[in-house]
Amino acid sequence: MSAQTKVRNVTVATLQRMKQEGEKFACLTAYDACFAGILCDAGVEVILIGDSLGMVLQGHDSTLPVTMDDMIYHTECVKRGNKNALLIADLPFMSYSSEVQTLENAASLMRAGGHMVKLEGGAWIANTTRLLAERGIPVCAHMGLTPQSINRIGGFFVQGRDTDQAQAILDEAKQLQDAGASVLLLECVPRALAKKITETVEIPVIGIGAGPDTTGQVMVLHDALGVSPITPRFVKNFLLDSSAGIPGAIKAYVEAVKTSAFPADEHCFD
Ligand code: KIV
């Protein structure tokens, strides 16, 4: 490939094709232009501008204080450093409570450079998903452990462990696909449930703490580099074994996702 050859942009269609062909894709969070460029050079297909920035950048103990202004600012930063990745931007806590508010806020994230917005919830976000999808805004529906609901859930617990709850998550995944979601994201669910959902829906599924069988994997960048204050069981520090610094660690993450070496058994929940 010549130095001038532009790498093809990753789109929703790319992720759909990868699912059909059984190819895994790698996603990491980024919040600034510098890391966005490093992630692209390492072959990361999807960059998530996550509201996790409230915890890893701003030092809050949850994602609830993150504002639309924060998300717009960091989406603009990532857009400037992005080369070819698909950018998913989080709609923060309480920014999709009414139809007008949802449309205005999602449009702001798309204008800032996002290619897709992510919102958290189950069946109750189906109408919101439809509202956005019908107006040309792709939606990633974040299910399982939804950190914006941490006060209702009562802690960062694995979701869908009992049969009824697992069935409810599966049913809601189908409803969100039918409502027009382009991608599902499953956080902290048993690997068997994530496998079942990934096999049941046609759209790509991104997992975090959801086992190795989803279409893609996501990790918070600071977790992958071992600089987060807390390290949940499902994360791995890829910088530990890197002889090529941060770029090498990110490349190792991409390689591990693509070969299904990550997540390993010790990163999964049953
Ligand atoms: O905000 C975020 O970074 C996320 C990931 C944990 C999936 O939602």
Image (spheres, rainbow, N blue to C red):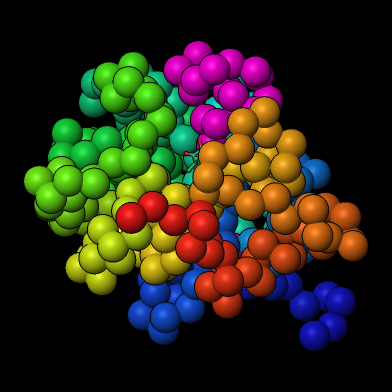
Q: Position of residue 249 (x, y in %)?
A: 77, 58
- Total numbered badges shown on the rendered structure: 0
Residue 131 versus residue 17: which sits nearer the camera? 17
The quadrant of the image that shows the N terminus is: bottom right
Q: Is residue 69 visible?
A: no
Q: Nearer the viewer, residue 35 or 72?
A: 35
Which residue appears at 73% of the width and 72% of the height?
6
Q: Is residue 268 magenta?
A: no
Q: Position of residue 241 (x, y in %)?
A: 81, 60
In front of the other: 70 or 21: 21
Using the rendered image of the protein, determine whether residue 71 is visible from the camera's viewpoint.
yes
Left or right, residue 209 beside residue 222: left
Considering depth in this image, is 237 or 200 the residue closer to the camera? 237
Quadrant housing residue 4: bottom right
Image position of 248 (left or right of 262): right
Is residue 46 in the magenta section?
A: yes
- Magenta segment boundaries in residue numbering: 45-68
- Would residue 109 appear left or right of 43 to someone viewing this image? left
Give the quarter of the image for residue 80.
top right
Please tell me whether the stretch drawn in magenta is mainly helix, strand or loop.
loop
